[in-house]
Image: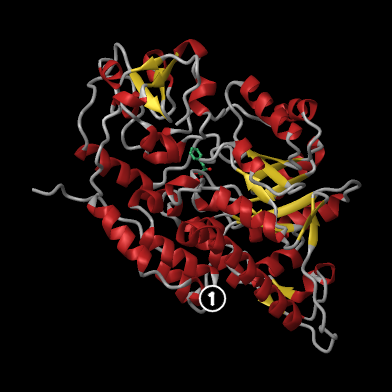
């Protein structure tokens, strides 16, 4: 905690006297803020702030806000000063039973060199993550059909390998939006990284910088945008994912700041005008709330069963539409990519709108349930774009369910430029920090090398649609061998629970 010379010092006792809806002060990172007028504006609702009224809220604040969220959202007149260090009574924190259990599990996790595939990270993360973090990260919408289909779709595509092609040397490097990438894979945006690891998204940044992989920074990352960029090595390329704010000035500032800091691509999320209902997340929030103290009756607040994500998504603008694209073009020169396209019709509209590319995505199965997999959409999009005839560069990316280099090669053979991987990298750092992410990158390399040799391609440009048989892709029935690793990590949805009597 740093206190500057001319800063007002406020005693802990004084802060404690402002512990109500009428006057609500909180401490975050050693600074005292008056959040009384902000209570009803807080995207997560007032209740959670009131729980920390008159005391230090840093621990609750940290995982779900970038460090500068409070300073940028509160007028400076509400920045009251620094907490007087002499008045802080050391709080001996009781380690919760869950935390003790977690620490014990972390100590017995498999050593990193026993991790051989990306499913392993998920299996470890599921055990060592705090319950809320696992619920938030792993959940998908409604019956979670799409999240499972995302995996299954890859298994409905079969390889048609070529042989005797001298594959002594294979090279899987590529360029993505003009940026060199050591893999045809980029790290896709996932939010709230500090729920799962104290360093949050910086684990991704450091590993990506070391291994020449591109990271897409999430609007709702736990680490601030600048913290992430500053953690990069000189010249490290980044993309940024954008949730469009109802207040377009905020969006404009964010986008232009990203461009100024050298970000190489703007990925606008277009599949989330409202956040999907993720029941694992919602249920846990419900249980948590009923055991907590009733802070305030009858207050204007977010419904208590919304889950972590829905609670903080109110700022996202549901009125975003095709007519807005020229405005985005007018505020930035970064390539614009629309993330969350699900049909050939919209792919063509995107092309006509002048953007530089699209991500075929169902948001990791977290938005419209029973939406199709990106791979299935890819086939119709590639065909539609070919039929139309494109006369300028227009890149098609896919994401969702990628766990193997073979998945990546199938997508590239069917016309994708590169593939986004979100959860697998997230689970890698939740389980093992930065070394986990590095290991995940290494696994992609090893699998790419083997699969490219066995498929008979030396460079990614040698991949052809004829190298896969995708005829079964849009057949949504039929038996296929079971993916046992995925099946054992997949946590089935839970039904309503009786209260303990
Ligand atoms: C998601 O959870 O799917 C996200 O895209 C991130 C997010 C987190 C919180 C609110 C809205 C979106």
Q: Residue furthest left?
A: 501
Q: How is the image coloured?
A: secondary structure
- The residue sitting at 57% across, 28% down in the picture is 317
The picture places residue 16, in percent across and down from the top left corner, at: 26, 20
- In the image, is 434 to the left or to the right of 292? right
**Label 1 Cα crowd, 10 Å radius (few <14 / some 14-19 / many 20+):** few
**Along the line of sight, which residue is nearer the eye, 252 or 338?**
252
The picture places residue 454, in percent across and down from the top left corner, at: 73, 83
The picture places residue 148, in percent across and down from the top left corner, at: 49, 62
- The residue sitting at 54% across, 41% down in the picture is 221
Q: Residue furthest bottom?
A: 164
Q: Is mark 1 within 8 Å of ligand 1?
A: no
Q: Can you see residue 40?
A: no
**Along the line of sight, which residue is nearer the eye, 128 or 226?**
226
Helix, strand or loop status at disc 1: loop
Residue beneath label 1, please? 116
The picture places residue 370, in percent across and down from the top left corner, at: 51, 53
Quadrant of the rendered image containing residue 401: bottom right
Q: Is residue 392 above or below residue 7?
A: below
- In the image, is 178 to the left or to the right of 269? right
Q: Can you see residue 116?
A: yes
User: Which image quarter is the N terminus in?
Assistant: top left
- In the image, is 124 to the left or to the right of 218? left
- In the image, is 497 to the left or to the right of 326? left
For the image, the number of numbered tags is 1
Q: Is residue 280 above or below residue 13?
A: below
Q: Is residue 136 above or below residue 105?
A: above
């Amino acid at each position: 905690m740093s206190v500057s010379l001319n800063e007002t010092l406020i005693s802990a006792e004084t802060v404690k006297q402002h512990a109500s809806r009428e006057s609500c002060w909180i401490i975050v990172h050693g600074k005292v803020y008056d959040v009384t007028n902000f209570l009803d504006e807080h995207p997560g609702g007032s209740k959670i702030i009131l729980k920390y009224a008159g005391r230090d809220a840093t621990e609750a604040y940290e995982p779900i806000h970038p460090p500068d969220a409070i300073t940028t959202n509160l007028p400076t007149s509400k920045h009251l000063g620094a907490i007087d260090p002499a008045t802080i009574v050391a709080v001996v924190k009781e380690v919760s039973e869950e935390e003790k259990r977690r620490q014990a599990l972390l100590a017995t996790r498999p050593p990193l060199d026993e991790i051989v595939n990306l499913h392993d990270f998920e299996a470890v993360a599921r055990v060592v993550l705090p319950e809320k973090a696992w619920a938030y990260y792993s959940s998908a919408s409604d019956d979670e059909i799409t999240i499972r289909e995302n995996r299954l779709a890859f298994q409905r595509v079969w390889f048609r390998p070529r042989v005797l092609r001298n594959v002594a040397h294979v090279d899987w490097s590529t360029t993505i939006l003009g940026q060199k990438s050591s893999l045809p894979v980029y790290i896709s945006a996932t939010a709230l990284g500090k729920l799962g690891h104290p360093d949050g998204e910086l684990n991704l940044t450091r590993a990506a910088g070391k291994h020449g992989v591109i990271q897409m920074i999430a609007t709702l990352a736990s680490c601030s945008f600048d913290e992430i960029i500053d953690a990069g090595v000189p010249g490290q390329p980044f993309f940024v994912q954008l949730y469009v704010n109802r207040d377009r000035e905020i969006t404009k500032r964010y986008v232009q700041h990203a461009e100024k800091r050298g970000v190489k691509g703007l990925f606008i999320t277009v599949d989330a005008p409202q956040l999907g209902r993720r029941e694992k997340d919602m249920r846990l929030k419900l249980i948590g709330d009923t055991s907590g103290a009733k802070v305030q009756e009858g207050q204007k607040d977010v419904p208590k069963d919304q889950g972590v994500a829905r609670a903080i998504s109110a700022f996202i603008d549901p009125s975003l539409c095709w007519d807005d694209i020229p405005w985005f073009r007018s505020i930035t020169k970064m390539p614009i990519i629309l993330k969350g396209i699900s049909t050939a019709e919209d792919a063509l509209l995107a092309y006509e709108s002048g953007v530089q590319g699209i991500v075929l995505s169902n948001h990791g199965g977290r938005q419209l349930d029973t939406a199709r997999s990106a791979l299935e959409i890819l086939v119709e999009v590639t065909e539609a774009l070919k039929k139309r005839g494109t006369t300028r560069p227009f890149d098609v990316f896919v994401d969702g369910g990628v766990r193997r280099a073979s998945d990546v090669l199938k997508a590239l053979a069917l016309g994708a430029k590169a593939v986004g991987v979100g959860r697998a990298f997230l689970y890698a750092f939740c389980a093992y920090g930065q070394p986990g992410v590095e290991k995940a990158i290494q696994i992609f390399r090893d699998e790419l090398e083997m699969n490219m040799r066995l498929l008979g391609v030396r460079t990614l440009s040698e991949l052809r649609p004829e190298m896969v048989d995708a005829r079964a892709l849009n057949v949504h029935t039929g038996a296929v061998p079971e993916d046992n690793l995925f099946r054992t990590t997949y946590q089935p949805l839970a039904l309503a629970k009786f209260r303990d009597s």
